[in-house]
Structures are given as structure tokens and as C-alpha cells.
Image (cartoon, helix red, strand yellow):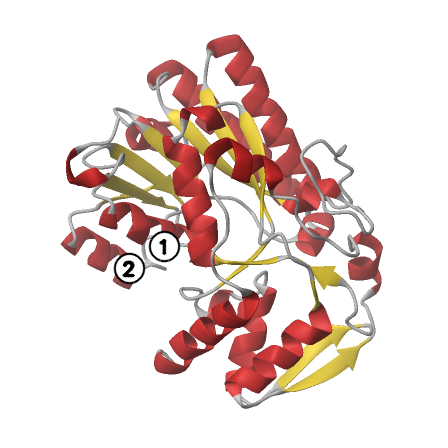
Amino acid sequence: MTRAGGSWYGQRPVTVIGGFGFIGSNLTDCLAALGARLTVVTRSPARHRSAAADAEARGIRVREGDLRDAAAMRDAVAGQDVVFNLAGQSGATQSVDDPWTDLDVNCRGNLVLLDTLRAHAPAVKLVFVGSCLAYGHVGSEAASEERAADPLCIHAVHKLAVERYLAVYGHAYGLLYTAARLTNPYGPGQPRERLAYGVVNRLIHLALSGDALPIYGDGSQQRDYIYVDDAVAALVAMGETPAANGRIYTVGSGAGTPMIEMARAIASIAGGGRVEHQEWPRLAAQIDTGDFVADISRIRCEIGWEPRVSLHDGLRRTVAFYRAHAA
């Protein structure tokens, strides 16, 4: 049912765990604009001091909490209607170099959250952000949810494990959940110092600084890049739509672009930077998924979401944002 003001989220209590990260901050802004009564949970308030102060000035409740801390999660989810979980350890190669931290944060942390929901907020709907890395090698075909998962790195294994946890808690305890296997997001809101896993935003910052844009190999590998506003719109729709309950969705643009073309477009739009081909690092080459394009038929048909921002338009908007906000 739509509430006052025309938004399903109007005056609903909603928590965003990891709400000051790249996607989380954009999601928080969107939900605030829709009228949600927001709580943002962050593991590092000092790191996000400015964002936290701004959020509190807008009436958003800010809480410190680690995903692995049951008491903090209990405080975060009590009395909520929807919980978005964007917290976690990122990085495919990092997960192979340090599997134990990835396991602790992404698996144990999500189990702590799920068991807290079971015990203290059984009516909450959980929206989990996973990864398209779960598919592994897909070849030339667009990847749909019917395709068997075949993860190539520890991070993808753990993200897939969380999807299985969700299914178990849904079956055993009636937990309402939905999960997004997200492709490569980019757009405004990712600080320069936190660009290790956002390839498009990282290349944009390099181009604006006049630096080289490193591309592994010949750059012919295709990737599916999704503008952050489109990714956020998908998550919002998944949270409010009953048809999404118990479903996993591949969330991307549905279009593939060779990395070399993406990098050249950035250099052209930014008016700086140059493409620099580099040899693949051994580990990165071993776990690379090759070409990847998302098949977004399921989410389009079931909840009516589809991306609206083309890659060129998204790159143009993103370059303009980071140029305007350069330190």
C-alpha cells in the first residue's frame, strides 16, 4: 500500500547497514527523499564523521555497529520494516590473499544478522547485496539466475553462501528476503581514497588527474557497468515489492562493453589520462571471470525495474560530479 506522499517507504522505519559506503550513501539519500524513517549503521563513525553529521542533521539516526556484533545488530533492526545490508568485506583478489577475514565478515557477520532477525525482528524484510562474481565464467551468453553458480574466488563463494543462508532462514523461520547479484557499479559518491574495488570510478579519478589508466591485457574483456542510481532504484524496488520475496536477481545494465572502450570513453569525456596496457597479475588472471553481461529479464518481468542510464550518459554525469568535487 502506498503511504502519504505517494511513497511506499513514507514514514516506514528502514535500516541501511553500511549506509555510508558508495552504494549505501546513494541508497540512504534515495530512501530519505522517499520519506523513510532511516537508521544508518556504520562500523567506522570516525571515518565517516562528516557524512554522519550531515545525516543526523537531516533527522537520520546513526548507529555504530559491526555486522558481527549481535548487540549492535539487535539495536539496528528492532522495530524496522526493511533492512538493507550493504556491509561486508570487498575484493576478489584480497579474499584469496586473506580468506579468513572475508569468511569472518561476510559469512559469520551475515549469520549474526540473520539470527538477530530471527530472534528479535522476525517480520523484517532483508535486502542483501551480493555479487555477479557468483556466476564465474559465463562465456558469450548473458548470465541469468537459472545458470548454475561457479564462483572463482573466495569472496564470490562467501557471497553465494549468504544466499544459501537466506534460503535456509526463509524456509525454517519465514524470513522475508531478497538478494541482488550486482554487476560493476559506478557513479557519484565514492571517495578517492576508497576506490580499490570500483574500477570505473577509479579510472575516472585517474583521468581527471591526468594519470595513466591501467588496463590488463588487451582490454577486450566485456563487463556490465551499472550507474549507481539504477542500482539503487533496483534495491528500493526489491525492498517494497512482495513479488521479490525469496527471489535472487541479477542487477546490471544488460549491456556489455569492452574494458578498453570504457577506458577510452572516460579519457575522452574527462579530457585527460591515457590508456596504459599492463600484463595481468598472476592471481588476477587466475580468478578473472572473462566476459560478463547480465540477463536482467527476471527483475524486469517480476518487479518492473530496468536501468535508465546509458554508459555514456553515466560516465558524463560521473566525470562532472568528481570534477566539481575535486579536492
- The answer to whether residue 175 is above or below residue 163 is above
Number of the label disc, if any, that sits on residue 25: 1
Report the front residue among 6 and 126.
Answer: 6
- Kind of residue indicated by mark 1: Ser
The span from disc 2 to disc 1 (Cα, nearest Å) is 9 Å
Number of the label disc, if any, that sits on residue 306: none
Residue 130 x/y as whole percent: 57, 40
Residue 96 x/y as whole percent: 73, 49
The residue at which mark 2 appears reads as 51
- The answer to whether residue 133 is above or below residue 265 is above
Residue 281 x/y as whole percent: 80, 67
User: In which quadrant is the N terminus drawn?
Assistant: top left
Residue 82 x/y as whole percent: 34, 30
Secondary structure type for disc 2: helix
- The answer to whether residue 73 is above or below residue 18 is above
Q: Is residue 104 visible?
A: no
- Kind of residue indicated by mark 2: Ala
- The answer to whether residue 55 is above or below residue 118 is below
Label 2 close to label 1 by CB (< 8 Å): yes
- Residue pictured at 20% horizontal, 43% vertical: 35
Secondary structure type for disc 1: helix
User: In which quadrant is the C terminus drawn?
Assistant: bottom left
- Residue pictured at 23% horizontal, 54% vertical: 55
Q: Is residue 312 left or right of residue 292?
A: left
Lower sequence index among marks 2 and 1: 1
* Other-residue count near label 1 (Cα within 10 Å), few / some / many at <14 / 14–19 / ≥20: many
Q: Is residue 261 visible?
A: yes
- Residue pictured at 56% horizontal, 63% vertical: 198
